Amino acid sequence: MSKPQLDQSQFAVLAVTLLASIGTHLDHLPAWLTPALALLIAARVLMRRRRLGKLPAWLRLPLTAGLLIGIILSFGTVLGRDAGSAFGCGLLALKLLETETPRDARVALGFCAFVLMSALLFGQSLLFTLGVCSVLVLLVAVLNRLEPAPLPTAKPLRTSLSLALQLIAVALPLALASFVLVPRLATPLWGAPNAGARATTGLSETMAPGQFTDLMSDDTPAMRVSFEGRVPPPSAQYFRTLVLSDFDGTTWTRARTGLKHDAEPARGTRTPWIDTTVTLEATQQRWLPALDTPITAPQGAFLTDDDVLVASQPVSHLLEYRVRSRLGPEGAGRLERFERQRLLRLPEGVGAQARELAARWRRESPGDAEVVQQALAMFHSSFHYTLSPPLLGRDSIDEFLFDTREGFCEHYASAFVFLMRAAGIPARVVTGYQGGWWSDSGAYLLVRQSDAHAWAEIWRDGVGWIRVDPTAAVAPARIEQGAAQVNDAASWAQGEWLRALRNQFDIVNRLWTQGVVRFDALRQRAVLTEFGLADRVNGNLLLMLAGVLTLMLLLATWWAMRDPPIPQGDALDRLWHRLRRTLSKAEIELAPSDGPLGLQQRVAVQDAELGRSLQPLTDRYARLRYAMAQPPADEVEALRREALVWSRRRLRRRIVQARLRKIASVFDAGRFTRGSP
């Protein structure tokens, strides 16, 4: 006895489901694997349409070996998250090459579920999770289409999708109970190592002219910041990330620094400080942004001599940390001689005109403050802020200061620090983020990649490092109103209405992150405390989960065993009931007891022409329903299509007229009522 084979529609939706499952991994698959898998699935679908059968084993085995070799060459191993998920996607596509029976399809769909689960190890944002869930709905719908129908007729895809949504909705209470009651790890499961993924912050240990351009047109979130106490004004929302102090004439780089102990404010000091909670997106880098000047390091991080927070491990997943920051100079003595020399060092053969200008300012100014004001006044009077500045040559400092006079924050910070050093003032470049969008309902500041910024710091003996932002002298709106007000990148994402919509939607993202993605042991305890279960041990939690599961199974058993009020029937019955309902809408009077012959005669009495056109349909229905035990599926489907065409041609006008008469009668009744004395 031959095994049942998949029909063309079943195989087509199976191929789409496999392709959608692999699509959840597109962001991290090797460049060669994505087109290879797409070509493989397309070739298999074409073979199936031409009835060429499945690919022979002597071809499938070399393809499997080639996949294994390609994964090893790309990742150096087949183990781990990245290599394992890529290998799984390849095996899923290869499984389609031998799939011919419903049993093969069920195995492939089971593998699809595993591939979908592994996709959540790469991203857990709300939109991505909803995308994975939509593929899961399709997967359950395909499983339903593989089940035999009462009659061998093709199930409409929308019926299978509706059933899949119902099944998933029924399973949601159990999923929620498991989510809350299953003992949690100390850190979220999603905090799996993410080594090897690309960085997303855009900030690096170097800064050169034009390097920030792409970053400033990127609207993806960088971090979210909550403040304890009063929220600083936008002009004070500087989030320090890196300090760059070495310059080679084109590029600023970070110098090696030592560690610094936490610098808690001394009692009685006048320097204000503030506590913040930062939720940082994964960056694959170790730098932790902090407001102004951090004075404490969170657990798993340390503070460097240049007041930069550095994590012990790259930030491979969403990270939340608390940090205390000082708002203003710390008050210090003098720089060490070697440190002063390093922060005054300039490359030879660069910026001759700038050096001459700085030397003149120094001769004409009584102190450092006057030199700073000279530089800021120059920027304010004749420079222009733009994200599309002209390209600079080898001597970028002089070309920017005396020729182009157009640029954005990195140009101004670089030129300003050069001028200060040329005037004998120790200075350095600081990169990070400035400003953001404040959410009143969420009580947090959303900082996007487009808020990336560069500014300068100068040293004053007895005071310490002082922040000076030359960009504020050129474009004050950038500091007071945010990057979105001045960044002129030609990007659809910069539209005002779309930006506002994205900002509002980020509140939902934050709730999702706090309530689901970061639901660890501490948050589980907080939730259970609300129900008086804070002291429950893991064993008791599992007993509670077992009780919830038992109750749900009992409810499901009762629901399955109850007598349905109306039997649904098979495809032929549904066709007959749909035809009767359509005739009733056309105001054709029918009796509940009418069979095919009686219905045709009753219609003929009311409309002879309509009855004659209906007779072939009722005769064919009677033959399929009563003259054979198992009507052929193709004949049932053909009758359904013909009945649909007949209804559209013969009854559409009658139905429209009947609806118009009903509307008119309603208006007539209303007019009579209003006109009555």
Image (spheres, rainbow, N blue to C red):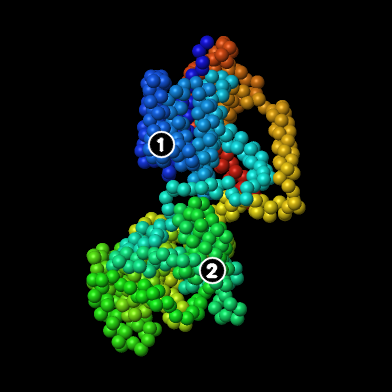
Q: Position of residue 601 (x, y in %)?
A: 57, 18
Residue at the disc numbered 1: 71
In the image: residue 4, left or right of residue 361:
right
Residue depicted at 51% across the width and 57% down the height: 312
Disc 1 crowd, CA 10 A, few/some/many (<14, 14-19, 20+) = many
> What secondary structure is marked by label 1?
helix
Q: Can the viewer see residue 408?
A: no
Residue depicted at 71% across the width and 30% down the height: 557
Residue depicted at 49% across the width and 66% down the height: 259
Disc 2 crowd, CA 10 A, few/some/many (<14, 14-19, 20+) = few
Q: Position of residue 59 (x, y in %)?
A: 38, 23
In the image: residue 314, left or right of residue 665:
left
Vertical arrangement, residue 47 with respect to residue 82, above or below: above
Vertical arrangement, residue 276 with respect to residue 630, above or below: below
Along the line of sight, which residue is nearer the eye, 340 or 554? 340
Q: Position of residue 500 (x, y in %)?
A: 47, 60
Vertical arrangement, residue 223 with respect to residue 478, above or below: above
Q: Position of residue 472 (x, y in %)?
A: 40, 74
What amino acid type should be assigned to the residue bearing mark 1? Ile
What amino acid type should be assigned to the residue bearing mark 2? His
Among numbered discs 2 and 1, the one appearing first in the sequence: 1
Residue depicted at 55% across the width and 33% down the height: 140
Any mark on residue 261, and which? Answer: 2
> What secondary structure is marked by label 2?
loop
Along the line of sight, which residue is nearer the eye, 292 or 70? 70
